[in-house]
Image: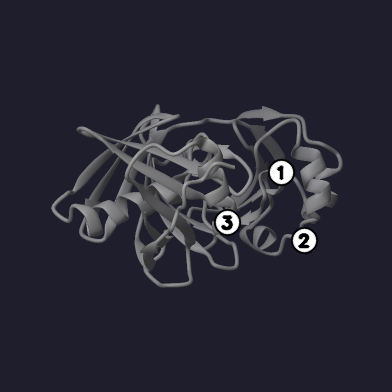
Amino acid sequence: MKYYIVDAFTDKLFRGNPAGVCLLESELPDRVMQKIAYENNLAETAFLLKKEDTYSLRWFTPEVEMDLCGHATLATAFVVMNFVDPELTKIEFETQSGKLSVERADDLYTMNFPSRMPLETAANPLLEDALGCKVLGTYLSRDLLVLAESEKAVENLRVDMDKLAAISKDISFAVIVTAKGSSCDFVSRFFAPNAGICEDPVTGSAHCTLIPFWSRRLGKNSMTAKQLSPRGGMLLCEDKGERVNISGKAVCYLEGDIMLPDLKD
């Protein structure tokens, strides 16, 4: 089985968010895909299967299957458009979150994803201690969005993962911490300790929530965003109402093969 590792939302190796991309020749059992994702030990591994005139795409963390993953979708489109069918400039995937499309213009890849506007919710009084920053407000979609004071506050978080896992366990998949940017429109960081991801370097799916949130607050539809993890990443964002466009670049780190025996366990 062909396997790639692609750094997404960057044009430089060892930056952005690395995703595994597996090109399936036939269906694999869920348990095998989960084992492969666990073995890869990346935030997400994507599994792509060609089905007649469409592609089926699924994503797994080392612990669970995801309903939506941005950087692994970008990475998968990059692999198909550079290694499988270089003539393609647009691809559509069938996923748990419906049909997702990716278009390429030169070295920029634009994903069209569903919008997930968060609703304001009461803040857990233990949240500031868990994050090491002042909390201005909390909002909930799939993830818990936490509004911080500044870009510097987001950059300098002191996160207690055990406390954050306990707080978020029963209310959200993950925690997004965000603030208005000083070097771009908005910044963020993303933590999913209950899914085996302490900090995700650059999270496309989080921007399904961040884009409508900041579009409304800033009064603009087109925005630039940075994720302030140690690896860092840059995203171009556009609010399209019920959908969002998320754009970024990617580079290939590894091309190889996964050797699968006749797995029965």
x and y, in percent, of residue 59 in the image: 48, 42
Task: State the CA–CA distance, disc 1 to disc 3.
Answer: 18 Å
x and y, in percent, of residue 103 in the image: 25, 46
Q: Nearer the viewer, mark 1 or mark 3?
A: 3
Pick the front one: 227 or 136:
227
The three-letter amino acid code for the residue at tag 1 is Asn
x and y, in percent, of residue 157 in the image: 72, 60
Which quadrant holds the C terminus? top right
Tell me the element at label 2: loop
Residue that appears at 45% across and 46% down: 70
Residue that appears at 54% across and 67% down: 231
Say which mark, if any, is on residue 158: 2
Tell me the element at label 3: helix
Image-quadrant location for residue 245: top left
Res 167 visible = yes
Image-quadrant location for residue 124: top right
Residue that appears at 30% across and 56% down: 79
Q: Nearer the viewer, mark 2 or mark 1?
A: 1
The three-letter amino acid code for the residue at tag 3 is Glu
Provide the residue designation for mark 3. Answer: 39
Provide the residue designation for mark 1. Answer: 194
**Mark 3 or 2, nearer chain start:** 3
